[in-house]
Amino acid sequence: MSAPSQARSGPGRPRDPQLDAQLLTATQELLVSEGYQATTIAAVARRAGVVTTSIYRRWPSKRALVEDAIFALDEFNHPVPSGDLRADLLAWTRLFLSASAHPAARSAIPGLLSEYHDDHDSYRRLLDRGELPTREALGELLAGAVTAGQADPGCDADAVFELLRGATLFRALTHGTDDADVFCAQIADALVAVAATPAGQRMRPNQ
């Protein structure tokens, strides 16, 4: 999951934040109750009590609508650094798991990933839209940890991010928040270990 975005709208069209929120909520509710495939533009319009053109003025496709509905769940305020790297990475892990484990996100993510399979440009735009600020914030955290002597100067911030994102997303999709405290503690320990290891010294395949 990534930072939330605002609904798309046509040029010169006045925004109605209340209707935007209504449509995003209807989409989230349908994802939970009916699943990704059944969450169509028409179904969202019926649930929200609007005509489909009201949605198409804001979002060009179902996928765009679902993306914004899922990102709207994040409220992605990055944890404020505490000075304790392990505690900070634990907070990041909990945040990522919570966002990905939301019932609407668990319903939508597999369907979105399937659609991105043959549309790499759209997937890259999606990542750039929300992922880069999160990577930068995590990089700043690790830079501060290096200064404080809690991380190695040669640590790979991208590796920390990929482990954090991959582990929490897979866990969310397969187990939700079951045993979340134990899982998050384990991942935080693993992230600390990666941060403490220079990139060139990590175990390579066949070593």
Image (tube, helix red, strand yellow):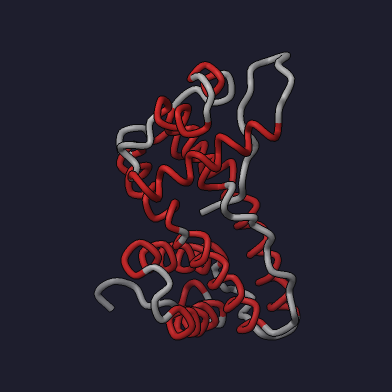
Q: Is residue 145 above or below residue 67?
A: below
The image position of residue 38, as x and y in percent, is 32, 36
Q: Is residue 107 above or below residue 19?
A: below
Quadrant of the rendered image containing residue 78: bottom right
Question: Which residue does the image show at 33% across and 44% down from the upper left?
Answer: 34
Question: Which residue does the image show at 48% across and 45% down from the upper left?
Answer: 28
Question: Which residue does the image show at 70% across and 70% down from the upper left?
Answer: 143
Question: Which residue does the image show at 45% across and 78% down from the upper left?
Answer: 180
Q: How many numbered dots are placed on residues in this image? A: 0
| Left or right placement of residue 1 versus residue 13 in this view | left
The image position of residue 139, as x and y in percent, is 65, 64
Q: Is residue 155 above or below residue 33?
A: below
Q: Is residue 85 above or below residue 118?
A: below
| Left or right placement of residue 178 versus residue 50 in this view | left
The residue sitting at the front extreme is 49
The image position of residue 142, as x and y in percent, is 65, 72
Quadrant of the rendered image containing residue 13: top right
The image position of residue 179, as x and y in percent, is 41, 81
Q: Nearer the viewer, residue 7 or 201?
A: 7
Q: Nearer the viewer, residue 130 or 161?
A: 130
| Left or right placement of residue 154 versus residue 141 in this view | left
